[in-house]
Image: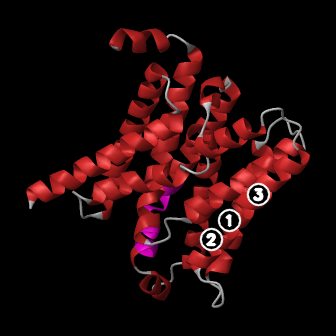
């Protein structure tokens, strides 16, 4: 098996996939802890469905680089979702469900009405659950992903203390002069960027798992915010690498394999937590 992996690693497209997958997993884990603690985990699910709808429109318009359309639309919806979630008439979970289901339904409807693809079911399935497109990345796409990932990590490190404060006590943060709305907006926008980057890796329906499972696993053993964040990052990157290598060698779907590894690690950590007690 090791020899097989070494043979695959000789191909540039495999190395590109591993680099991009690692970066996406790292970025997802950093803000996954914040989303879980703020009980807003399914913002990732909602925005991923928005990205699916935007990708459907980009495909109909035959845009050569759909990310130039999908990224702004997803970021805009992240802002709208944050604003709508604060509305007294439409609470956060209802806003996520409304946008999520609406975008998914409209995207699929548009694909059926206007798509000229001869394999519509295959296109939809690969978009929802991930596809082998992670193995067809160009060097330019890898550099773009690397650049955006570096920006995400830098933003998280620079505003770590503010994100920590906003995560645990918005009222106190607001009382001491912290611009809570601005930092919530920053979190939403960064999550939107991560989701667009992760579309090719795990698909729009599985992105939430990439964000949530490493954080939940880390919380089984660590109690401090920093400890959970560091452990979550290590687990996320490790599971992504393991999942991609298993997928490449075994020929299994990339996104589903990564999520399966995340689930296995989560249950392993649950067992360790019970054993410690």
Figure quadrant of the C terminus: bottom left
Residue at the image point whose x is 61% and y is 69% from the top: 185
Residue 276 position within the rendered picture, expressed as x and y whole percent measured from the top left: 9, 57
Q: What x and y, as percent, mark residue 195? A: 60, 51
Q: CA distance from mark 2 to mark 1?
A: 6 Å
Nearest the eye: 160 or 132: 132
> Label 1, on which residue?
101
Dot 2 or dot 3, earlier in sequence? 3
Q: Is residue 165 above or below residue 49?
A: below
Mark 3 Cα shell of 10 Å, populated few (<14), some (14-19), many (≥20): some
* Mark 1 secondary-structure assignment: helix
Magenta residues span 155-167
Residue bearing mark 3:
73
Residue at image point 55% right, 43% down: 150
Q: Is residue 115 above or below residue 76?
A: above
Residue 230 in sight here: yes
- Asked whether the viewer can see residue 157, the reply is no
Question: Answer yes or no: do the residues labelled 2 and 1 have beta carbons within 8 Å?
Answer: yes
Identify residue for label 2.
97
Image position, residue 60 (x, y; %):
88, 44
Q: Nearer the viewer, residue 159 or 229?
A: 229
Q: Secondary structure at mark 2?
A: helix
Q: Is residue 228 above or below residue 140?
A: below
């Amino acid at each position: 098996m090791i020899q097989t992996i070494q043979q695959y690693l000789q191909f540039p497209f495999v190395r590109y996939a591993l680099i991009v997958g690692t970066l996406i997993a790292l970025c997802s884990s950093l803000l996954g802890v914040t989303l879980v603690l703020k009980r807003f985990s399914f913002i990732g699910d909602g925005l991923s469905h928005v990205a699916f709808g935007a990708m459907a429109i980009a495909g109909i318009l035959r845009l050569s680089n759909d990310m130039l359309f999908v990224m702004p639309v997803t970021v805009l919806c992240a802002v709208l979702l944050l604003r709508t979630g604060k509305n007294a008439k439409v609470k956060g979970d209802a806003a996520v469900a409304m946008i999520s289901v609406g975008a998914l339904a409209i995207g699929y409807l548009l694909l059926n009405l206007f798509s000229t693809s001869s394999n519509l079911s295959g296109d939809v399935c690969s978009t929802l659950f991930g596809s082998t497109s992670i193995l067809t990345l160009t060097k330019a796409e890898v550099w773009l992903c690397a650049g955006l990932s570096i920006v995400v990590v830098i933003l998280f490190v620079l505003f770590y203390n503010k994100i920590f404060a906003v995560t645990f006590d918005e009222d106190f943060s607001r009382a001491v002069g912290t611009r809570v709305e601005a930092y919530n907006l920053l979190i939403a926008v960064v999550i939107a960027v991560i989701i667009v980057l992760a579309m090719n890796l795990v698909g729009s329906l599985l992105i939430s798992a990439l964000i949530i499972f490493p954080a939940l696993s880390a919380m089984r053993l660590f109690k401090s915010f920093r400890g959970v964040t560091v452990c979550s990052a290590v687990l996320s990157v490790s599971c992504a690498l393991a999942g991609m290598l298993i997928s490449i060698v075994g020929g299994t779907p990339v996104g589903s394999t990564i999520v399966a590894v995340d689930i296995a690690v989560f249950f392993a950590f649950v067992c360790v937590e019970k054993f410690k007690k």
